[in-house]
Amino acid sequence: MFHALADGTRRDIVAVVLVGERSVSELADRYPMSFAAVQKHVAVLERAGLVTKERRGREQRVRGRAEALREAHRLLDQLELGWRARVDRIDDLLAETAEPPTEPPTEPREGA
Amino acid sequence: MPVTDVVKDPANLTLTLTAQFDAPVERVWQVWADPRQLERWWGPPTYPATVVDHNLAVGGATSYFMTSPQGDKYNGWWRVRTVDAPHSLEFEEGFADGEGNPSPDMPVTVMRVTLAAQDGGTRMEVVSTFADTAAMERLMAMGMDEGLTASVGQIDPLLG
């Protein structure tokens, strides 16, 4: 559960800072959690390459990296295709062992 | 279609895929636990996987390689974080050097697999999380996306 809440917070932070730059304090005001907790989420996003953080005077300004998010979208699309193919192969493997081997159909193959 | 749901969460670099199989949980667990079955589906037909070691215990390791159509070998590894057979498995996975040692500069993915009895079959959920976008980019740059997806709509088992 904690993990899911953290995921939701980070999704929201990314959405907000993509629209406009925010300070960490401004972000912290949005969530029912400590400044330190929000700072930690920002640090995770920064390490992931999804936001940049810049110190300006007393403030730390956070900005979303739209290109990184687009890239993440593209890569997750690729990963999805890979997993769909794996699931199909698992399904084939399970079907193979679920029933005893049967005689192949006798009708000629089309387009062969 | 066995895939019933896909959730992509780019802000968390996470893909959650849910599939429904017409087989009991114990049977679906075997495709993960039995190395001979694992190598039937982990790599696509064009990049078949050969599992060298496979130990699904906490801290246990798996090592395998995938062979490209040109005969190049890509070594990979798993490190098991948690396991509760036949219901759940969490492991880190990544690429390895020629000796099978994890490559420090290569991406590590965390995978969480959950199997649950549902509708007379098994619901499988796989959650994959990347550490960072740079890691994902390196993975794709290696052409592994091509290797992973090569079989989509390509192989009719009857023709194989």
Image: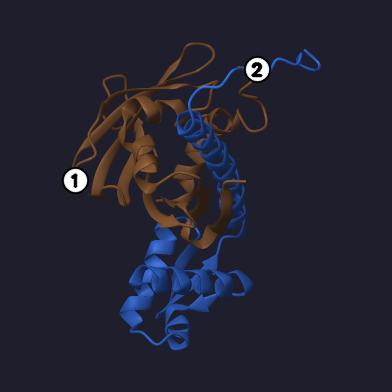
Chain colours: A blue, B brown
For the point 35% across and 24% down, the residue is: B36
Query: Residue B100: image x %, image y %?
Result: 28, 24
* Left or right of residue B12: residue A64: right
Q: Residues within 10 Å of mark 2 (few under 14, many from 20)?
A: few
Three-letter code for the amino acid on which mark 1 is drawn: Val
Q: CA distance from mark 1 to mark 2?
A: 40 Å
Residue at 57% across / 55% down in the picture? Answer: B6
- Please give the label number shown on residue B159: 2
Q: Identity of the amino acid at label 2?
A: Leu
Can residue B105 be seen at all in this image of the molecule?
Answer: no
Q: Which residue is mark 1?
A: B58
Q: Where's residue A45, x and y in %?
A: 44, 63
Compared to B134, does B54 lie above or below? above
Q: Quadrant of residue A57?
A: bottom left
Residue sitting at 33 percent across and 77 percent down?
A37
Q: Residue at x 27, y 32 (%)?
A: B62
Q: In the rendered view, would you say B67 is above or below B105?
A: above
Tell me residue A29's x, y (percent): 44, 88
